[in-house]
Image (cartoon, grey):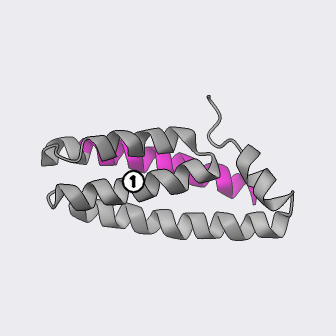
């Protein structure tokens, strides 16, 4: 799938309610901003915390339909024992993908 976000699940959850979709976008962004901040601090820290945070981030991304972002989170979750350099490289890719999702959402609202 090449779309930044597949809105099928979102539209089913909201039944096309644009105000509710706006609320869900805002909550998604708040939550993911928190995940990104937390992960930035975990590149050198506990592998288990990294895995748990990536797992939660993956769930939120997939729930919205941001499948490419979710796939990166899956890779990050699976690489929880990676060294700091590898985690930092994953974070760069994750930041770029999340920025792309944020731009896509901003264009819709």
Name the element at disc 1. Answer: helix
Magenta extent: 89-109
Viewer-nearest residue: 101 or 69: 69
Q: Is 22 rendered above or below residue 86?
A: below
Viewer-nearest residue: 47 or 4: 47
Looking at this view, name the residue that lies furthest to the right: 16
Q: Position of residue 39 (x, y in %)?
A: 30, 60
Q: Is residue 99 magenta?
A: yes
Question: Can residue 43 be seen?
Answer: no
Residue at the (66%, 63%) spot, across then down? 25
Residue at the (48%, 62%) spot, across then down? 32
Residue density around tag 1, few if under 14, some if 14–19, many if 20 or more, within 10 Å = some
Question: Can residue 23 be seen?
Answer: yes
Disc 1: which residue:
55
Q: Is 81 rendered above or below residue 106?
A: above
Left or right, 36 with reference to 21: left
Q: Position of residue 96 (x, y in %)?
A: 44, 45
Looking at this view, name the residue that lies furthest to the top: 1
Q: Main secondary structure of the magenta part?
A: helix
Q: Position of residue 46 (x, y in %)?
A: 16, 60
Left or right, 90 with reference to 9: left
Q: Is residue 92 magenta?
A: yes
Viewer-nearest residue: 52 or 28: 52
Residue at the (40%, 63%) spot, across then down? 35
């Amino acid at each position: 799938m090449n779309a930044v976000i597949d809105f099928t699940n979102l539209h089913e959850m909201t039944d096309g309610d644009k105000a509710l979709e706006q609320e869900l976008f805002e909550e998604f962004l708040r939550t993911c901003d928190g995940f990104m901040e937390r992960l930035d601090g975990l590149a050198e820290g506990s592998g288990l915390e990294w895995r748990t945070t990536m797992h939660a981030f993956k769930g939120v991304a997939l729930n919205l339909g941001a499948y490419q972002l979710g796939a990166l989170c899956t890779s990050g979750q699976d690489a929880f024992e990676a060294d700091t350099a590898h985690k930092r490289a994953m974070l760069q890719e994750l930041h770029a993908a999340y920025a792309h999702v944020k731009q896509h959402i901003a264009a819709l609202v």
